[in-house]
Image (tube, rainbow, N blue to C red):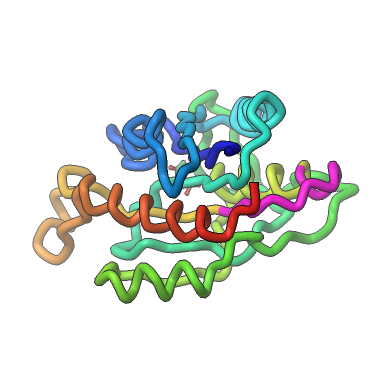
Amino acid sequence: MSALLVTGFEPFLTHDRNPSALLAQTLDGQSIGGHPVAGLTLPVTYAGAAPRLQQAIEAMRPAAVVMFGLAYETDCIRPERLALNLDDATAADNDGESRRNRPIDPAGPLGYWSSLPLDRLADRLGRAGFPVKISRDAGGYLCNHLFFRTRHWLEERGRPIPAGFIHLPPLPDGIKPEDRGHRSGMDLDRQLTAARLVLETLAERAEV
Ligand code: PCA
C-alpha cells in the first residue's frame, strides 16, 4: 500500500521546538491502517520547503499528504480550509527572506481548497475530545506558502490525492512566560494521538 506522507517544519523565529517536526519524526516508519507512514521535516524557507516536499512526493507517490505546522496563537488543532496565492508576512524566513503582499504564482489561481475531508476530520477529533477549530486560511507565511504550492503542483499534474494543512498549538514548554498564566499548550503525546487519528481517518478512505 502506498504511504501516508506527513510533513513538519523546523524551528523558526523564537520557537525553539516545533511540535510539527517532532510529530513527523515520531510518525516516520510507523504503520497506520495498513499504510506505511513517511515523515519529513522541512526547512522554514520560501526557497526550500516546497521543492523538498515535491521531491518526496515524486519519489514516494503517497496516497495522501498531511502538512503540519505550528501556530503559536492557537490552543486548538486547526485544519485549514484555504491555501491562498499570497505571501504576506512581516517575519523573515530562516534564510532571512521576507515577502510582503506578493503572489506566490502570478499565473496561478487565487487559491485552492484543502482536499482533506476537513469536516469529517474535525468531527472525529472533536468526538475524541480534542479542541478543534477549522480555520479559513493558513496565514501569509511559510505554512500557507507550502500548502498553496503543494496543492497547485498536484493540481497541475492531475494528481487528485488528499492534501492539506493542519496547524498545531505550541507544546507546553513553548508557551512564552507572559502567556503562562492563561495558556498551557498541548503536550506532544496528545498531538501525536490527534495526528494518528487524522491519518487513520484518511487511511479508511484511501483506495491505494
Ligand atoms: N509555522 C509557520 C511556519 C512554520 C511553522 O511551523 C506558519 O504558520 O506559517
- In this view of the protein, which residue sits in the foreground, 137 or 53? 53
Q: Magenta span has 159?
A: yes
The percent position of residue 90, horizontal first and vertical second, equals: 53, 46
Residue 172 in view here: yes
Q: Magenta span has 125?
A: no
- In this view of the protein, which residue sits in the foreground, 202 or 7? 202
Quarter of the figure that contains the N terminus: top right
Total marks shown come to 0
Side (left or right) of 206 relative to 191: right
Figure quadrant of residue 156: top right
* Residue at 73% over, 60% down: 112
Residue 175 in view here: no
The percent position of residue 162, horizontal first and vertical second, equals: 64, 54
Q: Over which residues does the magenta segment extend? A: 154-164
* Residue at 57% over, 66% down: 117
The percent position of residue 111, horizontal first and vertical second, equals: 75, 60
